[in-house]
Image (cartoon, rainbow, N blue to C red):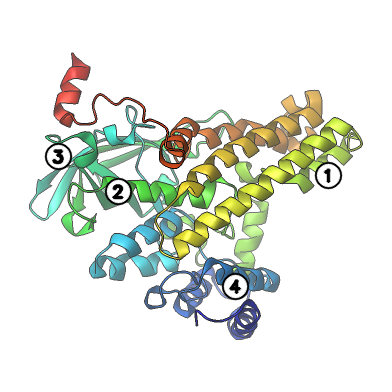
């Protein structure tokens, strides 16, 4: 099917939707139909719930589904970070066990990456795994994990060898979240929400069969996972439909119509005011009688231009990934663009509102949505690797600038820990 043009694809999707889509189906039933048909994730391989399409062909599928009003396939860390890594590095057994529950949305996934002393320098992570027969015993701490409280599984890089330099002693696992050795504590943010958590591992266990890639060779898997995250989220490209996956979301056995209504009435603060939307800022400017202000108009146009070029960059990154190419500079460029867009939206929204941008609640302009967006925008310079790290990646790997000095790069990690303590 890979040779089909967009019109042929749209016609085929339209016919399939006419026979299969109904808002009276439960979310579980609908997502299973999508997974088994291959239309949910058309860029995935045909043998793994896809169609083997290019990103351009997949765009035709999304357009037709949107126009039909059909609920989009499940979207989250499992789909954007877990599945691509398993399809690339996983064994046949791992693909058999993990891919279908991700495709059907019956499992929700999260990621355990950052640590208190290993954020931007992720290779310095200290959460360790010690082998115990067919399992590994995990001890340590992760932080800034989102969606953890409702997740079934997580992707997790661990220190499995401290006798080699930090980049060479890491291994990449998939771990069951719901177990006695994992304690999750919510972190309250500036905007009043607690979308992130810190997680403590005390003799938690992960199976050796859930090691992704080779033992002590997890750094490359980790880098590719982060690149997939940046490509999926950082530049504001969203391929999801808003309904959260996983049994613990409580949405799977609602009808699609009920789930859509539930999502419309629920509060999701980060989506309260769309980042990077020139149209949203034009509407806001009209509401506050400053749409004829030449400076405001110019800033809206600048934001629109930034958003469009970021979208094109993100699509190039996704197209490369769909063709099996390793993540390139587009993911870091998209991340930096996303940071700039978030800040530009924040600053422009607050400029339009003036003193009203300090207000929250029902009586505030837009019921406080713009203020909430401003408070939430700070995350964009941190998630998926800090803005500074992305600039280093572009400088070193794209422009060929000299690398920053790293005195601990070739030192066994246990010796680095000893020197830090002393």
4 or 2: tag closer to the N-terminus: 4
Q: Are marks 3 and 2 in contact (CB under 8 Å)?
A: no
Q: Are marks 3 and 4 in contact (CB under 8 Å)?
A: no
3 or 2: tag closer to the N-terminus: 3
Label disc, if present, on residue 61 of the rendered structure: 4
Label disc, if present, on residue 283 of the rendered structure: 1
Spatial CA span between label 3 and label 4: 45 Å
Residue bearing mark 2: 220
Instruction: Say if residue 325 shows up in the picture.
Output: yes
3 or 1: tag closer to the N-terminus: 3
Instruction: Give whichever of 21, 401 is nearer the camera.
Output: 401
Locate residue 135 relative to residue 87 in the image: left or right.
left
1 or 4: tag closer to the N-terminus: 4
Residue bearing mark 3: 161
Residue depicted at 18% across the width and 18% down the height: 419
State the SS at label 3: loop
Spatial CA span between label 1 and label 4: 30 Å
Find residue 190 and report its horizontal and vertical position in percent: 56, 28
Spatial CA span between label 1 and label 2: 45 Å
Mark 1 vs mark 4: give the one in front: 4
Q: Are marks 4 and 2 in contact (CB under 8 Å)?
A: no
Locate residue 406 relative to residue 410 in the image: left or right.
right
Spatial CA span between label 3 and label 1: 56 Å
Spatial CA span between label 4 and label 2: 32 Å
Locate residue 391 relative to residue 214 in the image: left or right.
right
């Amino acid at each position: 099917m890979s040779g089909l043009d967009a019109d042929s694809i749209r016609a085929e999707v339209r016919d399939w939707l006419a026979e299969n889509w109904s808002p009276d189906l439960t979310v579980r039933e609908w997502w299973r139909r999508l997974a088994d048909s291959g239309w949910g994730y058309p860029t995935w391989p045909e043998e793994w719930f896809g169609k083997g399409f290019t990103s351009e062909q997949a765009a035709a599928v999304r357009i037709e589904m949107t126009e039909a009003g059909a609920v989009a396939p499940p979207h989250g860390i499992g789909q954007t970070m877990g599945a691509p890594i398993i399809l690339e590095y996983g064994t046949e057994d791992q693909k058999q066990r993990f891919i279908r529950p991700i495709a059907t949305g019956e499992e929700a996934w999260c990621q355990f990456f950052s640590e208190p002393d290993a954020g931007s320098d992720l290779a310095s992570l200290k959460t360790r795994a010690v082998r115990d027969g067919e399992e590994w015993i995990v001890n340590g701490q992760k932080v800034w994990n989102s969606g953890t409280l409702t997740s079934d599984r997580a992707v997790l890089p661990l220190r499995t060898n401290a006798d080699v330099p930090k980049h060479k002693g890491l291994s990449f696992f998939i771990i069951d979240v719901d177990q006695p050795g994992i304690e999750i504590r919510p972190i309250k943010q500036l905007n009043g929400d607690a979308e992130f958590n810190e997680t403590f591992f005390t003799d938690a266990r992960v199976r050796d069969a859930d090691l992704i890639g080779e033992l002590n060779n997890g750094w490359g898997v980790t880098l590719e996972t982060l690149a997939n995250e940046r490509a999926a989220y950082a530049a504001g490209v969203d391929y999801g439909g808003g309904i959260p996956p996983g049994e613990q979301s409580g949405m799977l056995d609602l009808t699609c119509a009920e789930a859509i209504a539930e999502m419309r009435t629920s509060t999701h603060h980060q989506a309260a005011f769309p980042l990077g939307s020139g149209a949203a800022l034009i509407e806001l400017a009209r509401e506050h009688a400053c749409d004829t202000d030449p400076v405001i108009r110019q800033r809206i146009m600048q934001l629109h231009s930034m958003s469009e070029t970021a979208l094109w960059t993100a699509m190039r990154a996704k197209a490369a990934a769909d063709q099996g190419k390793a993540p390139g500079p587009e993911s870091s460029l998209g991340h930096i663009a996303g940071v700039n867009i978030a800040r530009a939206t924040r600053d422009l929204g607050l400029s339009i509102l003036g003193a009203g941008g300090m207000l929250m609640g029902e009586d505030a302009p837009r019921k406080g949505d713009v203020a909430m967006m401003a408070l939430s925008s700070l995350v964009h310079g941190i998630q998926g690797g800090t803005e500074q790290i992305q600039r280093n990646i572009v400088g070193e790997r794209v422009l060929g600038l000299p690398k920053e000095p790293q005195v601990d790069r070739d030192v066994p990690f246990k010796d680095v820990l000893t020197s830090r303590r002393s």
